[in-house]
Amino acid sequence: MRSVSLTLMLAAMAGCTVGPDYNGPPEVKLGEGWTLPTPEGKADAALSDWWRALGDPALTRLVEQALAQNLDVRQAISRIAEARALVAASSARSLPVLTGGAVAAPLHQGVNGPLPALGSRDTTLYAFGFDASWEVDLFGSVRRSVESADARLQAVQEDAAAVRISVAAEVARTYLSMRGAQAELAARRMSIETLQRTLDAARRRLAQGDVAQADYNAIQSRLDAGLAGLPAIEARARGAALALGTLLGGLPEDELALLGSGGTLLVVTELPTGQRADLLRRRPDVRAAERKLAASTADIGVATAELFPRLSITALGGFTAAGANPLFLGDSLSGIIAPLISWRVFDGGRVKAEINAAQARHETAALAYEGAVLNALGDAERALSQFRFARQAYVLQQQAVVSIEQDFRNAQRRYQSGDIGLVELLDAERQLRDAQEGLARAQANAAIDLVSLYKSLGGGWGAPQADIIIDTPVHRKERVIYEQAN
């Protein structure tokens, strides 16, 4: 009775949990910035929505296929399954362990053996029974372990979300790079066609003595330079298509058919970034760092619990007999319940060292969280700045295209009235094609920087209104686009 009373008293202490409670992450000064508020009534979109806002069905298909088949994403899902299993294993420590067993063992004992009552020196001993053991979680070691495992599961889930965002962004950037290269290639070919026509006209005028040899050679040099640049642009487009195949978890050549199709590149006219504090709930890397900090806090409690007594309760019961027939009779039944209290009296300071190590890891996790917040801010600021400048360059290049197009129209009128020759007209057209090629590069850069901005802001928020700025593989309606953008 005294043993049972002591056991019950110690079990009542199981509500005690040692170690610090987690009260949230440390405060990090976010400073000032981002004056563009999120429009009222426009909630953050789900992670799977931002590429849909770009309005390109091919891009949507590529991203969603990559999220289903990309090997990095599938590895992240496997890590989530592993973390869930570890949570279940930690939780199972709070439950009793029940083991069953049976034995049928031939027994031969000497004359002075311990079982004279058997009546024979040679017999078979039969036994069947169960034993149960349970370690009472007196000071919260198991509870803290479950807290730690659960927080780490959440951190792994956030890491998986970060992988999904990275894969989606990489697919979008690669796709937009391919479309940009296609548009640039189309503009370069149009420029080369104009240069070839200019060269043919210059050749005729050279034979008539109306054009100097140096002018003819200059046109030839520009044509040669334009032709020399074609393979590099073609390689960029093909390389991006090959990369898409790999990103989708397939063979590199699986998406080469995209090179024969057109698509759209989009740039928003205004991007609602929200407040800086929004990053703390948008960015999965920040959320993962916070969950790792929570896990490290619980780990201190796990280490601290080793300083205190441990209570284990063992129960054994079953049937034992020197024959199969009487095995399950009442006289063959036996059992025992034995509480065991253990306490480390001396361990050379190992527990204290483990507690100090856990506290140091907690400090490291706190610093890692602060670093994750600051890195997120820096990443977002850089992406926002780069997008704004890229879009500014795109708008300026649009204006340049419109101005040069006006010059080309004037040149056409002057050519029709006989004020200038064909070479001068073709030169004005070449300048227009060169400006359109520059527009293709500016458009692609702005679209790619938009994707980077989505990624840096966490990837889950309202979709902005967008302007179609490229229709590949050939430029169309630059003037209409410019008028819509302004």
Image: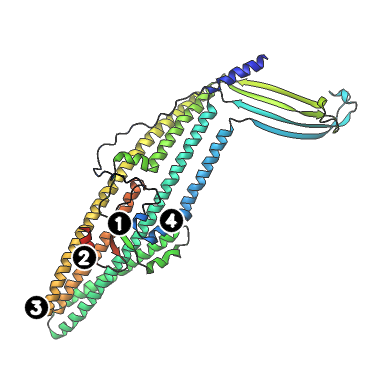
Give whichever of discs 2 and 1 has the lower sequence position. Answer: 1
Name the residue carrying label 2: 479
Look at 46% across and 33% down and name the residue there.
295
Residue 262: x percent and y percent? 35, 67
The quarter of the rendered structure image containing the N terminus is top right
Give whichever of discs 2 and 4 has the lower sequence position. Answer: 4
Residue furthest out toward the left? 419
Name the residue carrying label 4: 64
Residue 440: x percent and y percent? 27, 63
Check residue 366 in the rendering and tell me which mark sits there, or answer none. none
- 136 lies above or below 453: above
Check residue 447 in the rendering and tell me which mark sits there, or answer none. 1
* Mark 2–mark 1 distance (CA, rounded to whole Å): 19 Å
Give whichever of discs 3 and 4 has the lower sequence position. Answer: 4
Residue 466 in the figure: left or right of residue 308: left
* Mark 1–mark 4 distance (CA, rounded to whole Å): 19 Å
Residue 434: quarter of image: bottom left
Give whichever of discs 3 and 2 has the lower sequence position. Answer: 3
Secondary structure of the residue carrying tag 4 is helix
Classify 10 Å Cα crowding around label 2: few (below 14), some (14-19), many (20 and above).
Answer: some
Look at 43% across and 57% down and name the residue there.
247
Name the residue carrying label 3: 419
Residue 375 in the figure: left or right of residue 353: left
* Mark 3–mark 1 distance (CA, rounded to whole Å): 42 Å
Classify 10 Å Cα crowding around label 1: few (below 14), some (14-19), many (20 and above).
Answer: many
* Circle 2: residue type: Arg
Residue 103 in the figure: left or right of residue 142: right
Residue 109: x percent and y percent? 86, 28
